[in-house]
Amino acid sequence: DIVMTQSPDSLAVSLGERATINCKSSQSVLYNSNNKNYLAWYQQKPGQPPKLLIYWASTRESGVPDRFSGSGSGTDFTLTISSLQAEDVALYYCLQYYSTPLYSFGQGTKLEI
Amino acid sequence: QVQLAQSGAEVKKPGASVKVSCKASGYIFTANYIHWVRQAPGQGLEWVGRINPVGGGANYAQKFLGRVTLTKDTSISTVYLEVSGLNSDDTAVYYCARESLAILVYDYWGQGTLVTVSS
């Protein structure tokens, strides 16, 4: 099984500042045949299901503000929020879908102001 | 519009079973896999399993093998999650989620069903 490890577990960032969340997989999630990283990022607010932000490691979902960006390849990935807004306070999860159908999530990162 | 509507909250005693439903609408039911993900109180997201709405074939996370069963009823566009031998560790919100055909990740989620296991 692919184990996903996020860091840090929690993060406090001032409004307007940059927030960076890391995700590391226990094995590569880069599929060589199509050169795609099978890594997604989700945002979850209290009492709500997760919301898709980023897929293929760096493709922003439609409607997601461009202050959210994803980067990385292979085993190391980063979610960056360029200028933190109050509404970005949430839990953030990475998800690997390389080992389909056995998907796995990171443990989550709590982002606060 | 695509919707996944889940059944209501359940309270069960240890050792009992629970069956949660997820009714799909707004798209062709047989076109997309449905996954189940659970979240214990204050904890992270945990993948439970996936069902193919065409043939009903299912895959499960190792820790749930033998205790979780995924089924479907195509006539009413509904998938079911059944958990047997409940214990307090199974107290969680259970979500169904649709796997996108194009990007292979979860693009739509149900609202979640809280299952509480308590004596």
Image: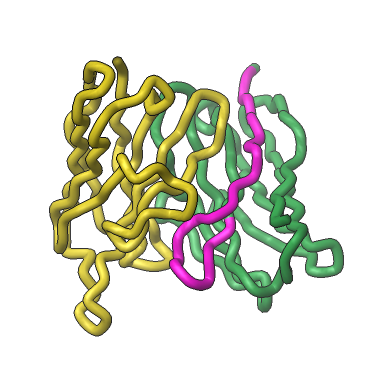
Chain colours: A yellow, B green
Give the image quarter of residue B51. bottom right
Q: Does residue A60 appear to the left or right of B39 in the view shown?
A: left
Q: Tell whether B107 sits left or right of A4.
A: right
For the N terminus of chain B, give its image quadrant: bottom right
Reply above or below: A98 against B2: below
Magenta stretch in the rendered image = B98-118
From what the image shows, is residue B46 above or below residue A8?
A: below
In the image, residue A50 lies in the stretch drawn in magenta:
no
In the picture provided, is A54 more to the left or to the right than B112?
A: left
Residue B101 locus on image (x, y percent): 53, 71
Front-most of residues A57 and B114: A57
Q: Taking the image as drawn, is residue B96 in sight?
A: yes
Q: Residue furthest right?
A: B75
Tell me the residue at 59%/47% (across/down): B109
Q: Residue at x 17, y 64 (%)?
A: A28
Q: Residue at x 25, y 50 (%)?
A: A70
| Quarter of image, res A35 | bottom left
Residue A86 vs A51, above or below: the answer is above
Q: Can residue B65 be seen at all in this image of the molecule? A: no
Query: Which quadrant of the figure contains the C terminus of chain B?
Result: top right
Pick whichever, B31 or B48, lies toward us: B31
Q: In the image, residue A32 lies at what x, y percent? A: 20, 79
The residue that appears at 55% across and 30% down in the rendered structure is B92
Q: Position of residue A55 (x, y in %)?
A: 36, 58
The one nearer the camera, A14 or A89, is A14
